[in-house]
């Protein structure tokens, strides 16, 4: 039997080498499940050939990276990136914004899966909770969609302002209070989380939260309006989807206005804007950015499993 030695929170542990455990972590670097298991078997046989009965996680990672580099240097890089983020001591709070239908929830789900982040919440859910607490009289905008909040503005904006954007901003700044509460709780509890939705807008989350290295925000974009509209069709085909396609088509122009506003805010606040055309490319861009800013040397903690 081959024993693997590692440390978790400063405490040493030893566990039997498992091809299942290893293949699961290889899939996070986008190695297919069958190939991942086969590679785990290759690595196990290499360890046996070298009469290794006990190995540290660090040394095992070296074997893994060597094999991955033979397989595909790009996959090796993805594996290294993933491990750098996993080793970091600080909780990672990832904020993914973009207008309705751009793909924030799909991308958030994929990133959570790739990074092994177990907590994910949509700003729609946060808004739903706030709607129970804040009455329609107190905040009419929160009881609307982001793209229809303009219909309930107490004070109509001056003619030179775009009412849709004024309503959207009022709606977002209200929901942002709830988003900040979730960020604060995650930081306090030390848990990594992904928060996604139309209410993640650069400039609307408190600066003292955004300036933390382990709080990262991304804005998803989709310049091609036809493709954006197509996302509503693809979403409503999902069996669990309950959102009325017609509503989004009817308000599509307003949704596009909010999207353009979010992107302009991202440019103002230097938040990465990622064109969400292909899921894998979007995820790779986000992970690369996080590795550069969050998973860098300064954050890498002690070796963890
Ligand atoms: N990069 C992509 N390529 C192809 N389809 C995508 C991509 N990203 C998302 N989609 C699809 O687009 C549809 C909308 O995605 P999603 O539900 O994640 O949007 P959303 O931004 O969360 O919208 P809302 O906030 O209104 O829920 C889904 O069917 C999803 O599978
Ligand atoms: O407010 C919005 O833009 C969307 C976001 O998902 O929510 P709903 O259309 O369900 O109101």
Image (tube, rainbow, N blue to C red):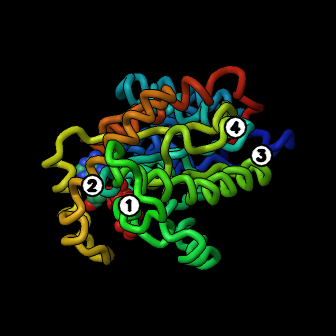
Say what secondary structure mark 1 lies in.
helix
Residue visible at 53% across and 73% down in the picture: 128
Residue visible at 30% across and 36% down in the picture: 275
Task: Mark 3 or mark 1: name the one nearer the start of the chain.
Answer: 3
Task: Mark 4 or mark 1: name the one nearer the start of the chain.
Answer: 4
**Front disc: 3 or 1:** 1
Q: Are marks 2 and 3 in contact (CB under 8 Å)?
A: no
Q: Are marks 3 and 1 in contact (CB under 8 Å)?
A: no
Q: Is mark 1 within 8 Å of ligand 2?
A: no
Residue annotated with mark 2:
254
Residue annotated with mark 4:
53
3D distance between C-alphas at marks 2 and 4: 63 Å
For residue 13, say whether it is visible: yes
Picture quadrant of ligand 2? bottom left
- Image spot of residue 238 (x, y percent): 26, 70
- Return the residue nearer the eye: 122 or 290: 122
**Front disc: 2 or 1:** 1
Residue annotated with mark 3:
14
Side of 79 where 276 appears, left or right:
left
Which residue of the protein is positioned furthest toward the front in this rendering? 158
- Image spot of residue 23 (x, y percent): 48, 47
Say what secondary structure mark 3 lies in.
strand
3D distance between C-alphas at marks 3 and 1: 59 Å
Task: Mark 2 or mark 4: name the one nearer the start of the chain.
Answer: 4
Say what secondary structure mark 2 lies in.
helix
């Amino acid at each position: 039997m081959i024993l693997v030695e590692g440390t978790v929170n400063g405490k040493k542990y030893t566990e039997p080498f498992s091809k299942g455990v290893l293949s699961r972590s290889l899939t996070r670097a986008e190695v297919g499940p069958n190939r991942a298991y086969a590679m785990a078997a290759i690595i196990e046989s290499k360890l046996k050939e070298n009469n290794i009965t006990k190995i540290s996680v660090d040394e095992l990672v070296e074997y893994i990276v060597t094999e991955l580099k033979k397989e595909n240097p790009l996959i090796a890089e993805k594996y290294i990136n993933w491990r750098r983020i996993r080793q970091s001591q600080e909780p990672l709070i990832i904020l993914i914004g973009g207008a309705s239908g751009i793909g924030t929830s799909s991308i958030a789900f994929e990133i959570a899966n790739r990074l092994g982040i177990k907590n994910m919440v949509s700003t729609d859910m946060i808004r739903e909770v706030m709607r129970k607490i804040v009455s329609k009289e107190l905040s009419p905008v929160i009881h609307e969609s982001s793209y229809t909040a303009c219909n309930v503005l107490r004070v109509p904006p001056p003619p030179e302002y775009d009412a849709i954007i004024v309503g959207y901003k009022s709606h977002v700044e209200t929901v942002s209070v709830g988003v900040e509460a979730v960020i604060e709780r995650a930081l306090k509890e030390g848990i990594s989380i992904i928060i996604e939705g139309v209410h993640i807008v650069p400039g609307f989350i408190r600066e003292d939260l955004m300036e933390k290295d382990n709080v990262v925000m991304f804005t998803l974009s989709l310049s091609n309006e036809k493709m954006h509209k197509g996302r509503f069709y693809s979403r409503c085909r999902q069996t669990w989807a309950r959102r009325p396609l017609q509503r989004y088509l009817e308000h599509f122009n307003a949704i596009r206005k909010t999207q353009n506003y979010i992107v302009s805010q991202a440019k103002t606040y230097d938040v990465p804007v990622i064109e969400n055309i292909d899921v894998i490319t979007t995820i790779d861009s986000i992970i690369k950015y996080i590795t550069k800013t969050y998973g860098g040397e300064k954050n890498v903690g002690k070796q963890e499993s």
